[in-house]
Image (cartoon, rainbow, N blue to C red):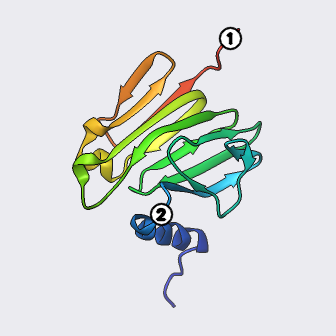
Amino acid sequence: MPAILPVRILTLLLVLVSAGAWSADGRILSFEGDVRVNGEPVDAETELNREDTITTGPDSSVKIVLSDNSVLDLDSGSEILISDYSFDTDEPGSNTSKVNILSGTLRYVSGRIAKEDPENISFTAGNSTIGVRGTFISISVSPPTE
């Protein structure tokens, strides 16, 4: 009898293969606990777009896939802003991804934008801007002290 892939793996593959057909810039792949987009709780249908702020509460996490198949993974107590994002398979020169890490930890696995034009990917963490020159990065930012 052939091996059967778990439903989660099949779902992930389906999401990644169909990512280019989305109307949104990204989607929630999975989440646990209190995860919010622009202050509203997420659900399995939550779509993400440019200028969305994603936050995770205590003991919470979220995995996001963007339309170029890049994956963002946030730990508990994290907050990011998708400050600019554009992906068009017909115009790769105009693609861009800029994410501000406001606090917490973000892990990133690169997608098509980073593979086709790595100069168009950047992360801002505090006063630093980080360019991607590989396929995986992890960034941690402490919340600002007042």
- Quadrant where the image shows the C terminus: top right
Residue at the location (38% across, 33% down)? 122
> 144 left or right of 57?
left
Circle nearer the viewer, 1 or 2: 2
Give coordinates of residue 80: x percent, y percent: 57, 35
- Position of residue 38 in the picture relative to residue 98 (left or right): right
In this view of the protein, which residue sits in the foreground, 103 or 92? 92
Tally of numbered tags: 2
Residue at x-position 52% and y-position 66% = 12
Amino acid at pointer 2: Ser
Dot placed on the residue nearer the N-terminal end, 1 or 2: 2
Nearest to the observer: residue 123 or residue 138: 123
Q: Residue at x 27, y 40 (%)?
A: 118
Location of residue 81 in the rendering, given as x and y in whole percent from the top left corner:
55, 36
Q: Quadrant of residue 121?
A: top left
Mark number displayed over residue 145 = 1
Above or below 129: residue 58: below
Q: Secondary structure at mark 1?
A: loop
Q: Residue 13, relative to residue 24: is it above or below? A: below
User: How dense is the environment of label 2, judged by Cα within 10 Å: few (below 14), some, or many (20 and up)?
Assistant: few
Q: Residues within 10 Å of mark 1 (few under 14, many from 20)?
A: few
Q: Is residue 78 left or right of residue 127?
A: right
Question: Which amino acid type corresponds to the residue marked 1 in the rendered image?
Answer: Thr
**Image quadrant of residue 104?**
top right
**Residue 107 image position (x, y, % from top left):** 50, 39
Label annotation for residue 23: 2
Give the SS element for disc 2: loop
